[in-house]
Image (spheres, rainbow, N blue to C red):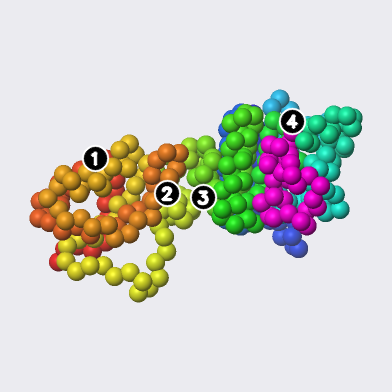
């Protein structure tokens, strides 16, 4: 569906050349939700804007469907962009227009007859749950509602691809989840290919099928989301995964019990991991107490860390550790039995 070949983008800044995207090769499959994650300045926004030629690459090719975007003239590019919707971090709504008129705007630009625009707008407002707010203005909407208008507008021309440029980073967590659930439903029901960029691993975990990690303009790691969570290869990827796998603990906030060992279990989504702790408590002659858990679901599996206080004979503890390892649960001894 989307193929990027040797993509490079440089900018002139004062007396130096800044490399924003540096030799990216990437293929995004039709119908998938593909996430691109990186910290500020990694080049992810520039990369996604080159897919619809809002930024022209300095080198390389962008192919969307059967079109090589980098070779199109202005008229052909305008037509091609009608098949690529885009939603933005700061909504980019027309503040003097109502919700209904904001959604109608791209259809007016595309030359749709008025008789077709009305029904299409009503259909889209129903899809995003804003039928009752059709006559409101952007200033009267919450952040989540504004983004729903942006999504409806991006879908107006029946696009085949939807680009999301940090579309949830200005929203609170609950609203973020509702927007992500809407995007996942659009993907399922319409078969739309979605490319989203973010700096939040929660967004990737929630809806993406595959993820690419960007650092200093390069793609440094890529794969199915589950594989990347279970076995991150690059230091920057491990930092992102740790956003979800460990909750911060302030100095002095947490005191371990006396005696026994303290284990940290790393759940990586393996089969049967959801039941390993109850089995550990039931099948081994150990006194096991749960100290702390920070576990997140990912595509019906569990990821994160669990801290246990474990007391019992050394041999029995070793059997229990081997049981956990056999279920692909890594064990770190935070405090040995001394």
Q: Secondary structure at mark 2?
A: strand
CA gap, disc 1 to disc 3? 28 Å
Observer-nearest of 40 and 191: 191
Observer-nearest of 53 and 5: 53
Question: Residue at position x 58%, y 42% from top?
Answer: 181
Graded by Cα atoms within 10 Å as few (under 14), some (14 to 19) or many (20 or more), the crowding at tag 2 reads many
Spot occupied by residue 114 in the image (x, y as percentages of width and height)? 89, 32
Give the quarter of the figure containing the N terminus. top right
CA gap, disc 1 to disc 2? 21 Å
User: Which residue position holds label 1?
Assistant: 326
Q: Earlier in the sequence, mark 2 or mark 4?
A: 4
CA gap, disc 3 to disc 2? 9 Å
User: Which residue position holds label 2?
Assistant: 296
* Boundaries of the magenta span: 123-152
Graded by Cα atoms within 10 Å as few (under 14), some (14 to 19) or many (20 or more), the crowding at tag 4 reads some
Magenta: main secondary structure? helix
Picture disc at residue 93: none
Q: Quadrant of residue 260?
A: bottom left
Query: Is residue 116 positioned above or below 198 on the image?
Result: above
Q: Secondary structure at mark 4?
A: loop
Left-right relation of 75 to 176:
right
User: Which residue position holds label 4?
Assistant: 158
Spot occupied by residue 139 in the image (x, y as percentages of width and height)? 78, 57
Left-right relation of 33 to 307:
right
For marks 1 and 4, give the one nearer the viewer.
4
Spot occupied by residue 94 in the image (x, y as percentages of width and height)? 83, 51
User: Which residue position holds label 3?
Assistant: 202
CA gap, disc 2 to disc 4? 35 Å
Q: Earlier in the sequence, mark 1 or mark 3?
A: 3
Q: Secondary structure at mark 1?
A: helix
Spot occupied by residue 269 in the image (x, y as percentages of width and height)? 37, 41
């Amino acid at each position: 569906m989307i193929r990027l070949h040797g993509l490079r983008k440089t900018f002139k800044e004062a007396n130096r050349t800044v490399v924003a995207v540096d030799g990216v090769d990437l293929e995004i499959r039709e119908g998938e939700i593909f996430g691109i994650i990186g910290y500020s300045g990694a080049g992810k926004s520039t990369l996604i804007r080159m897919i619809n030629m809002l930024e022209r690459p300095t080198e390389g090719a962008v192919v969307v469907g059967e079109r090589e975007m980098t070779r199109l003239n202005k008229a052909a590019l305008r037509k091609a962009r009608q098949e690529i919707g885009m939603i933005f971090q700061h909504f980019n709504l027309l503040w003097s227009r109502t919700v209904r008129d904001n959604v109608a705007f791209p259809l007016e630009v595309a030359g749709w007859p008025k008789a077709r625009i009305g029904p299409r707008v009503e259909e889209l407002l129903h899809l995003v749950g804003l039928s009752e707010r059709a006559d409101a203005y952007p200033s009267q909407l919450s952040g989540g509602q504004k983004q729903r208008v942006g999504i409806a507008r991006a879908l107006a021309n029946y696009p085949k691809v939807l680009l999301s440029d940090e579309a949830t980073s200005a929203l609170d967590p609950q609203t973020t989840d509702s927007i992500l659930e809407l995007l996942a439903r659009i993907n399922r029901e319409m078969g739309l290919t979605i490319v989203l960029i973010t700096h939040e691993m929660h967004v990737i975990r929630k809806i993406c099928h595959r993820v690419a990690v960007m650092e200093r303009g390069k793609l440094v790691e890529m794969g199915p989301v589950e594989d990347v969570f279970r076995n991150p290869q690059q230091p920057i990827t491990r930092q992102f995964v740790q956003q979800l796998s460990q909750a911060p603990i302030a100095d002095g906030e947490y005191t371990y019990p006396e005696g026994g060992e303290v284990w940290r279990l790393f759940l990586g989504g393996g089969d049967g991991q959801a039941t390993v702790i109850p089995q550990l408590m039931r099948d081994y002659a150990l006194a096991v107490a749960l100290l702390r858990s920070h576990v997140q679901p990912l595509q019906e599996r569990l990821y994160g860390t669990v801290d246990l206080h474990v007391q019992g004979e050394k041999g029995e503890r070793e059997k229990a550790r081997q049981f956990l390892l056999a279920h692909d649960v890594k064990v770190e001894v935070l405090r040995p039995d001394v």
